[in-house]
Image (spheres, helix red, strand yellow):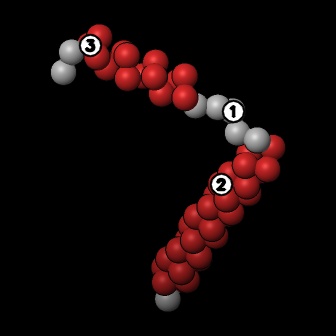
Amino acid sequence: MDINTEIRKMIRVLRVSTRPRKKEFELMAKVTLAGVIIIGAIGVIISAVFSFIDKV
């Protein structure tokens, strides 16, 4: 676990990596947005269920 080896690995990854194309970026943004919406909806549903249970 040499620091220099780890830094070389990181530099190699940065050299190989490229910026995403517009279509790839749009797809990643859509998937991320869908995930945020789904998690938010689950949170609202759980909150509503517990609110309903608390009233009963």
Residue 32 has which mark? 2
| Kind of element beneath mark 1 | loop
Query: Which residue in the protein does label 1 denote?
Result: 19
Label 3: which secondary element: helix
Residue situated in front as seen by the camera: 28 or 47: 28
Would residue 46 be seen by someone viewing this image from the given angle?
Answer: yes
Q: Position of residue 5 (x, y in %)?
A: 28, 16
Q: Are marks 3 and 1 in contact (CB under 8 Å)?
A: no
Q: Taking 41 as reference, is 55 above or below it?
A: below
Under mark 1, the amino acid is Arg
Q: Residues within 10 Å of mark 2 (few under 14, many from 20)?
A: few
The mark lying in front, picked from 2 and 1, is 1
Q: Nearer the viewer, residue 41 or 46?
A: 41
- Mark 3 and mark 1: Cα distance apart in space: 27 Å
Report whether residue 44 is seen: no
With 51 as the anchor, is 6 left or right in this view? Answer: left
* x then y, percent, for residue 53: 49, 84
Q: At label 3, which amino acid type do we have?
A: Ile
**Residue at position x 59%, y 76% from top?**
45
Q: Is residue 33 above or below residue 42?
A: above
